[in-house]
Image (spheres, grey):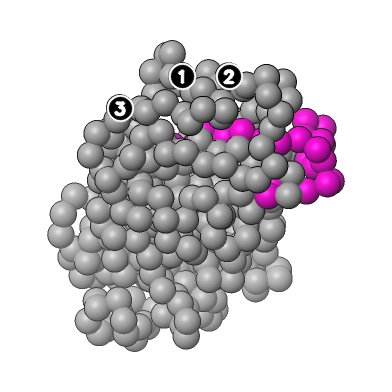
Amino acid sequence: MRPNRPAARAAVALIATLGLTGLAACGSASSPSAGSTGGSTAASTAGSTGGSTPAASATRTPAPDGGALKGLTATGAVDLKTAPKVSLGKTPISTKVVDRRVLTEGTGPGATTADTVRLRAQIFNGTSGKLLDDGYGQGRAAEGYRLGRADLIAGFTDGLVGATKGARIAFTIPPEKGFGSAGNQNLGVAGTDTIVVVADIADVHSALSQIDGAQTAAPAGLPTVEFKNGPTKEPTVTVPKSAAPTTTQQATLVQGTGATVEKGQTITAQYHGVLWKDGSVFDSSWQRGAAADFPIGVGQVIPGWDKTLVGKKVGSRVLLVIPPADGYGTAGSPPKIAGTDTLVFVVDILDAY
């Protein structure tokens, strides 16, 4: 279910603007989120909660540490406050594979595709040497990306696998792992251009894969929720025969102990949505087999999500009942959701970044 779906926030700049995220829909035409984007600050412990299970490690071979970037320099401290002074050296830089160079060593385990990486990056056209995007620009902050997301282009993910906290790395994104032979004329990237990324790594952490805490019963008059097949499968939601509430209702069924979700962050969540009128499923990330990522509190999801999920703890399971005014309004979201439909969601919050 796709809550609303506006364009990516300007704050994620080139990663979204250049299309390094494809901003693919999270599923059906009625998904609760307006769009999937990366980007905003989160504590390194955002995914650590009591009573919940961290995501299993997913491995991917780090990009080769080859010679395409041997002339590149990036001077200055990795303090995530001051932009490095970058020189690409001899141009054009062109590679057939993602090539990576560690400029400053970090600490801790290297990122896998199960991890979320927060970074500040400068991105260049390797042919012309032109700066395409500056993650240290005014008003910008560290931006987060869950590397397992299907909407990240392959070269961006490949370049970040193996990155460690506190490191400064440089990597290439060849056309085959980026825009392909079509390039992107609007952004000044030809189909033969290799992109060069210089990234300072603020944090590497794992999201939860499931929520295991003891679940409390829903308040009287609200739907009941049962996970008959365990927390990795969609729940059974039973809607009362009574009239739907006329205002948004929420109940925390499992209280997480992780970081508090803040306005402007991106959450990673599993969710299941049914209609109050008949209990039919209109969208479910659990049924699709993968968690989804949504900017929260910034109007890129339906109002009922923005109003209720900001302030919740990572590791929480939340039941939401959302009338049309806080859902899709009188227009609904055809073909499944009419303008008079009240929506019921079960949401497991696995990460916030």
Residue 192 numbered tag: none
Task: First in sequence, mark 2 or 3: give its number.
Answer: 3
Q: How far from the left and from the top, in percent, is residue 226?
A: 46, 19
Residue at image coords 50%, 35%: 319
Crowdedness near tag 3: few (<14), some (14–19) or many (≥20) residues, C-alpha within 10 Å: few
Helix, strand or loop at disc 2?
strand
Which residue, as the protein is rendered here, is positioned at the far top? Answer: 228
The residue singled out by tag 1 in the image is: 226
Which residue, as the protein is rendered here, is positioned at the far left? Answer: 107
Are circles 1 and 3 on residues that touch, CB within 8 Å? Answer: no
Residue at image coords 38%, 65%: 41
Please state if 42 lies on the left or on the right of 7 as rendered: left
Are circles 1 and 2 on residues that touch, CB within 8 Å? Answer: yes
The residue singled out by tag 2 in the image is: 238
Look at the picture and state if 132 lies above or below 228.
Answer: below
The residue singled out by tag 3 in the image is: 214
Residue 148's quadrant in the figure? top left
Magenta highlight range: 326-348
Task: First in sequence, mark 1 or 2: give its number.
Answer: 1
Q: Using the image as rendered, state which of residue 75 and residue 172 is in the foreground.
A: 75
In the image, what residue type sits under mark 1?
Glu
Please state if 59 lies on the left or on the right of 335 as rendered: left
Measure the alpha-carbon separation of dots 1 and 2: 9 Å
Residue 119's quadrant in the figure? bottom left
Tell me if residue 245 can be seen. yes
Helix, strand or loop at disc 1?
strand
Residue at image coords 65%, 71%: 187
Q: How far from the left and from the top, in percent, is residue 224?
A: 51, 22
Residue 194 included in the magenta stretch of the image: no
Q: Using the image as rendered, state which of residue 133 and residue 308 is in the foreground.
A: 308
Task: First in sequence, mark 1 or 3: give its number.
Answer: 3
